[in-house]
Every structure is written in structure tokens, then in C-alpha cells.
Amino acid sequence: MQHLDTRKQLSKILGDSVSEETHTWIENKLDLIIKSKSAKELYLSYSLLAGKIDTAKKPRIQGINQELQEYLIAQNADLLQIARIYLLSKVLESDLAYFSIKVANLIQVADTGELETFLKFLILLPNTGDYNQVGVEALRTNIGIIFDAIALNNPYPSIYFNDQQWNQMYLKAAFMERNLGEIVDVEKRANKDLARIISDYAHERWAASRDIDPLFWRPVTGFLEGVLLQDMDHLFRSKDINENLAAALCCFYSNQPEAIRLLNKYPHLKEKVANKAVTWENLKNKL
């Protein structure tokens, strides 16, 4: 997303959605923050927005860039979140070198709602990669809404996390029983270490007679050999049709001869995948 254009469109949403008085207050505060370079005013305004914005009122997002519109819908963005991310975007664009440190400090003392907003919409900020460590720190939390803010429906981890960070996020999402279908770019970020981790975790769950979300297997598609191929056989033999279908999806798209041979033993499943009657997307919708 182009950040200057995004900031302008966030401003348009606010202009269309809040009262003229509130919109004027926001713009006046921004002028004060930018002209005085006041960190104190930035922190105070970020907090005071909570008392100025009616979160029960739906933001009017018609007439803006479709990509941004879809992102705001996916994140169920409310007016307070939009106002806060707009404020941060504009001060950062005014003087990135000065305000980057101030924004980082703001997030260090943010309450849960403020941090959730920052993580959800981090991708919209200028020089968003500078805040990678904030995203990584969010993986360590046991607060569900904070973890979800960075992990679900958010392209930031796919773009800025290394493999170790990505793998940690994926495994923790499974452990916390999050909707794995809401993680962005699962196939793009698949890697051999993650495939091994998935197999090890699955074996622990099976040993404890615990269920596994069939979507959990999605990243192993390109690595089906050895133990992972045996895991596919286990899934095919399961009494859970969704596990059967997950194995079929993995094998069909693997391009591994042994995996295809295994899939050929289940022609009814192969046909469903080949005809796209079953995909990872509609499998997730059935779960």
C-alpha cells in the first residue's frame, strides 16, 4: 500500500464519518504536534482520541482504494482505530527521523487497546519495517487480542518476519487454537523447518489423543518425504473426512511422485481436489 495515499484515504474516512467538530479537533492537534514537535502532545492526543470518537458508529469506507477497503473490513476496523493510525501516519510522514523514536516509545507504554490498534494497522505506517521488534514481541503474549492483531489477517509477518519468527507464530497460533485460515501467505512462507516442526507437534498431539486442525498441515505440501509422507498416510486413514481432505490437498500439490502414488489410492479424494470441489479455502470454511 502506498503510504501517502493511504494516509489521505484515512483522512477521507474520518471526514466522512465523524462530526466536523471532531475532525477539526484531530487536524488541529496534528498541526500542533507537527509544528511543535511535541512528544507529549502526541502521547496525549493518541490517548484522548478514545473520548472523542464514537466506536459504535461504523466508519464510512466507500469511495476509497479497494485494497485498503478490504483490509479495513478484514480487520473489522472501527473509527477509533482509524483515527489513531491516521494520527501516527501523519506525524511520521512529517518527520520520520524525529517521530519514529517517539512512536516506538508510545507503543512501549500503550494499553491493550492501543497496542492492538498499532499491531493490526502496522502495515499502513511509513517505514513499517522499523517496528519489526514490536511485532515479534507480540508473539510472546498470552493476551489473545494482541496475538491475533499481529498473526491473523495481517500481511506484516509474511513481509517482515524471518523464518524462525514466522514458524514461532504459526505454531503458537495452532497451540492457541486460532483460525489458521486467517494467517496470510501460509504457502508463500512455508519452509522445511516448519514442516518438521508441524510433524513433531502432530506426533505429540496424536500420542496424547488430541485433535489437530486439518489446516495445520497446509505448509508441509512441498516437503512430503520420509516421516511427513507417513503422516499423510495417517491422515488418509483417519475417520475425520477433513483430515482425509487435508492429506489429499497436500499430496496433490506436492509434485512428489511418492505422494501422488499415495493419493492415487484414494481416487474419490483426488477427484475432489482436482476438480477444485475442495480447496484450502473452502476446507477452512467448513471447519
Image: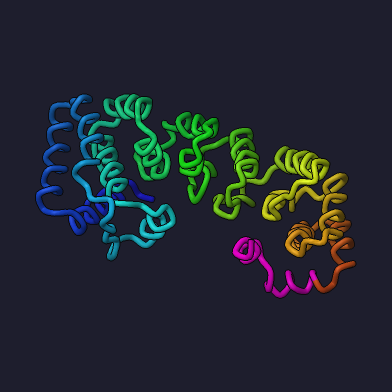
Q: Residue at the location (89% across, 62% down)?
A: 261
Q: Residue at the location (9% across, 49% down)?
A: 21
Residue 60 against residue 144 in the figure, above or below: below
Q: Residue at the location (90% across, 67% down)?
A: 265
Residue 218 visible (yes or no): no
Residue 2 against residue 46 in the figure, above or below: below
Residue 216 against residue 248 in the figure, above or below: above
Residue 202 visible (yes or no): yes
Horizontal side of 58 relative to 25 (left or right) equals: right
277 falls in the magenta region: yes
Horizontal side of 1 relative to 98 (left or right) equals: right
158 falls in the magenta region: no
Please tell me whether the stretch drawn in magenta is mainly helix, strand or loop.
helix
Marks counted in the figure total 0
Measured as percent of width and height from the top left, residue 170 is found at: 62, 42
Measured as percent of width and height from the top left, residue 211 is found at: 74, 50
Horizontal side of 88 relative to 140 (left or right) equals: left
Which picture quadrant has residue 189?
top right
Stretch of the chain drawn in magenta: 269-287
